[in-house]
Image (cartoon, helix red, strand yellow):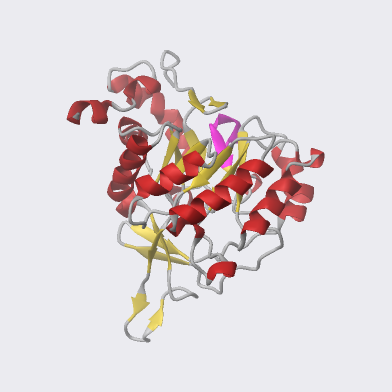
Amino acid sequence: MDETVDLAVQVGALRLQNPIIAASGTFGYGVEFAHLVDLNRLGGLVTKGISLEPIEGAPSPRLCETPSGMLNAVGLQNVGVEAFVRDKLPLLRKYNTHVIVNVFGYCLEEYVQVIERLERKDADGIAAYELNISCPNVKKGGMQFGADPVQVGEVVKLARAAARKRPLWVKLMPLVTDIGLTAQAAADAGADALTVANTYPAMAVDHRSAKSKLGNATGGLSGPAVKPITLRLVWEVRKAVKVPVIGLGGVETAEDVLDYVTVGAIAVQVGTSSFADPGASEAIVGRLAGAVNRANFKSINDMRDRFSVEIG
């Protein structure tokens, strides 16, 4: 690593040693990767989504390869907040990296209850929360929270009030009418940062059997195929709000990171790459300083928003 290049970034109140964060749902609870990745080298990691009660998840198969990407339908399987605090969090405290806990619920009250449980003293070691608002609101007919700016504002406002000790990030849905409006609703309600974006609803079928290639009929598309679309979303969100934006979608190389930074991302999350190569996030950290240097910069922060400046 080129020691003359400054990779440190500031995501609201959190200072990260570099902008590489392992994404939720692709890195387990973090501890599963500790024998494959030096967690201390990452800027941070986001745990898989944590709910109020344990969830078994979707039927298998849960993963399906697609051209330049992957479909997943894991179904938000997790151990529940009590088991996470008891069994997972003590192991995560051993590492010198920011641990961001992804939180979700099927109604407003569940988001609040999960955060309130994580606010207690025995849950020390958490750096921030990331709200997954792509869940169906069972009290409003199953409409996803993140599809409506009004619902986005409601869930973020309540989560913000519950999250007294830590920053609150919000993970936005990609397929909305105007992501700038969604981002503004989240920021106005108290989000400290926005993750752009979650996976894209998609499907894959076997025409011979007339069945889905997943246990569910549909899944979430991720990987290199979505990067050009998500780059535009990051740019749109960065124009709409002042809070930090974290890019997520198709990051495989250090150059991918710099593409996201150029359109305004403060940091990036590495997701699908970890399925093909569990050490992908650490490998990108190792190559990032050289990529910044080759671009003739000494700080990754100096690269941000150049695209917006160029096009006016």
Q: Is residue 237 magenta?
A: no
Tally of numbered tags:
0
Q: Quadrant of residue 6?
A: top left
Report the magenta residues as a range: 37-45
Q: Is residue 43 magenta?
A: yes
- Relative to 111, is 70 on the left or the right? left
- Relative to 104, is 245 on the left or the right? left
Question: Which residue is farthest top?
Answer: 4
Q: Nearer the viewer, residue 13 or 71?
A: 13
In percent of the image, x 60 and y 63: which residue is there? 106
In percent of the image, x 48 and y 34: which residue is there? 20
- Location of residue 229 in the rendering, given as x and y in whole percent from the top left corner: 29, 50
In percent of the image, x 45 and y 33: which residue is there? 244
- Relative to 99, is 199 on the left or the right? left
Q: Is residue 163 above or below residue 276?
A: above
- Location of residue 181 in the rendering, given as x and y in whole percent from the top left corner: 38, 47
- Relative to 306, is 243 on the left or the right? right
